[in-house]
Image (cartoon, helix red, strand yellow):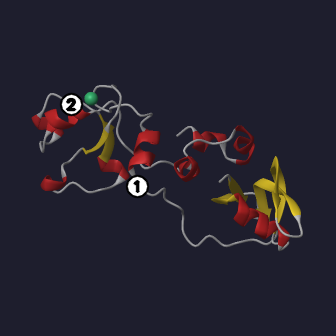
């Protein structure tokens, strides 16, 4: 199932939904199509282009500043699938301050790691080892949730997303 990027009335990216859901918003005249996939969705009476980017006709207030959900896929995307200790291929996630030592499950304390670094570090603090982080882990900036949601961003979505935040 393909997905569509939903923009607020102000063109601010809001979320990613299944294309079928986006098509319903368009049919209900709640949104307009900014970009379609070139394929069509057939229902009993209608044939509609499958939307890829839509914009809501009325403004939706976003109640909080969106923080990308912390999960393995998101950590791997942020860390370029590289172990943050040795730059090898990442296979797992590691808590920099181990959970057993009070480390939190937050973006700032979780990094992608290869299995051997993970095993080597065990439940020690960084200064108790000779291992060093390649860079300090931070929460991805606002729009990385789009990347997290779809894995990779279709090229034609890029103009609608802020390029500076995407490369974070
Ligand atoms: Zn490693």
Tell me if the residue at label 2 has its CB under 8 Å from ligand 1.
yes
In this image, 42 relative to 16: left or right? right
Residue 80 % position (x, y): 45, 33
**Which residue corresponds to the image point at 45% horizontal and 58% vertical from the top-left?**
69
Is residue 13 or residue 35 the one in the foreground? Answer: 35
Of the numbered discs 2 and 1, the one sitting upstream in the chain is 1
Q: Residue at x 65, y 54 (%)?
A: 1
Nearer the observer: mark 2 or 1; the answer is 2
Apparent side of residue 152 relative to residue 50 in the rendered image (left or right) = left
Callout 1 secondary element: loop
Q: Dividing the image into four equal quarters, which quarter contains ligand 1?
A: top left
* Residue with the mark numbered 2: 116
Count neighbours of disc 1 (C-alpha within 10 A) and say few if under 14, some if 14 to 19, many if 20 or more: some
Give the residue pinned by disc 1: 70
Image coordinates of residue 62 in percent, x first then y, are 62, 70
Looking at the image, can residue 20 be seen?
yes
Residue 25 vertical position relative to residue 140 in the rendered view, above or below: below
């Amino acid at each position: 199932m393909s997905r569509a990027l939903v923009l607020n009335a102000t063109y601010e990216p809001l979320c990613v939904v299944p294309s079928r859901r986006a098509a319903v918003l368009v049919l209900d005249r709640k949104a307009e199509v900014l970009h379609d996939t070139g394929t069509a969705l057939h229902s009993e009476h209608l044939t509609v282009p499958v939307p890829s980017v839509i914009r809501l006709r009325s403004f939706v207030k976003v109640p909080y500043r969106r923080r990308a959900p912390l999960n393995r896929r998101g950590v791997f995307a942020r860390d370029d699938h590289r172990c943050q200790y040795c730059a090898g291929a990442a296979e797992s996630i590691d808590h920099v301050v181990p959970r057993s030592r009070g480390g939190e499950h937050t973006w700032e304390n979780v990094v992608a790691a290869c299995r051997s670094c993970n095993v080597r570090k065990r439940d020690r603090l960084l200064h108790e080892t000779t291992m060093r982080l390649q860079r300090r882990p931070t929460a991805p900036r606002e729009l990385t949730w789009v990347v997290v949601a779809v894995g990779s961003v279709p090229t034609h979505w890029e103009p609608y997303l802020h390029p500076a935040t995407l490369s974070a």
